[in-house]
Image (tube, rainbow, N blue to C red):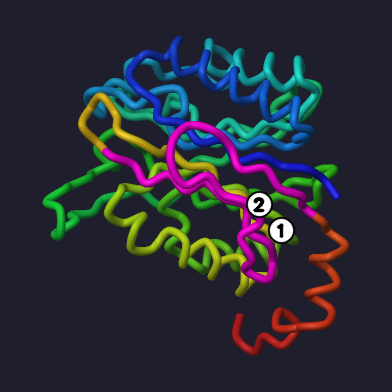
Amino acid sequence: MSKVAAIQMASGPNVDANLHEAGRLIEQAAIAGAELIVLPENFAIMGIEEEDKVAIRESEGKGPIQKFLMEQARLHKVWLVGGTVPLECPDPKKIFAACMVYDNKGDCVERYDKIHLFDVDIVDTGESYKESETIEYGDSSLKVIDSPFGKIGLAVCYDLRFPELFRGLLDLGAQVVVLPAAFTAATGLAHWESLLRARAIENLIYVIASAQGGYHINGRATFGDSMVVDPWGTILNRIQHGTGMAIADVNIDYLESRRNTFPCIKNRRLK
């Protein structure tokens, strides 16, 4: 078994303050024995305006946010999933929302650029979001990496609503999927737990969902409820409100046992 942690934050517009808070929580998780730690989407900045993240975008392999992630992974000897990092893209007015994974030596071992962008109107609350105005679509390359904790698939927030992405990760061998997120309060209340448990159950995978949770200076409210879900859909641990973490054990032997005794993946007829 391996211990994992889903970190929950309520990030603001001050990058230094956010990194300090992330560092505090990473240290707590490492002390508690976590070997794989997942930070939420936009952990380094939730700006006043959407364009604020573009102003701090970094080139791949350079910049204070990536340096922070590298140093934290190396310092605590943990694998660290850096939520999303604003990275340069060809359009100077946009970024790639890049999920960066660092091993326990501080080396970046994978990068996934968010594929599905949150362009929606929430009628019930009057909220409107248009991520594609400041974020460039990822190139649809699915990413699954080998790790000491099993094969890890990468997804981000709105990706959760697209089961075909998770099936694609499963077909690439995923046993664990990490999901940094910043769900709205309204959509989180309606769908967050249901979607997480459904993705875990239908693919017989662990899901480590690390969320923004709280009220932000820009007026936005995020849902939180970071959790670790096992392949049978059981919520192993969660933090519903406030800043903190959900820590739980991932057991790949248990996962494979479930897949063998309940072979719904092998029984698939349509692919």
232 within the magenta span: yes
Image-based side of 250 in relation to 187, left or right: right
User: To which residue does mark 1 refer?
Assistant: 174
Residue 4 or residue 161, whichever sits in front = 4
Q: Position of residue 74 (x, y in %)?
A: 76, 18
Q: Position of residue 264 (x, y in %)?
A: 70, 83
Callout 1 touching callout 2 (CB < 8 Å): yes
Determine whether the residue tagged by mark 1 lies in a helix, strand or loop.
Answer: loop
Q: Residues within 10 Å of mark 2 (few under 14, many from 20)?
A: many
Q: Is residue 270 above or below residue 68?
A: below
Image-based side of 207 in relation to 158, left or right: right
User: To which residue does mark 2 refer?
Assistant: 153
- Identify which amino acid the numbered label 2 is placed on: Gly
Q: Is residue 18 above or below residue 120?
A: above
Q: Residue at x 88, y 62 (%)?
A: 253
Residue 89 or residue 63, whichever sits in front = 63
- The C terminus, quarter of image: bottom right
Q: Residues within 10 Å of mark 1 (few under 14, many from 20)?
A: many
- Identify which amino acid the numbered label 1 is placed on: Ala
Q: Identify the magenta region.
A: 221-250
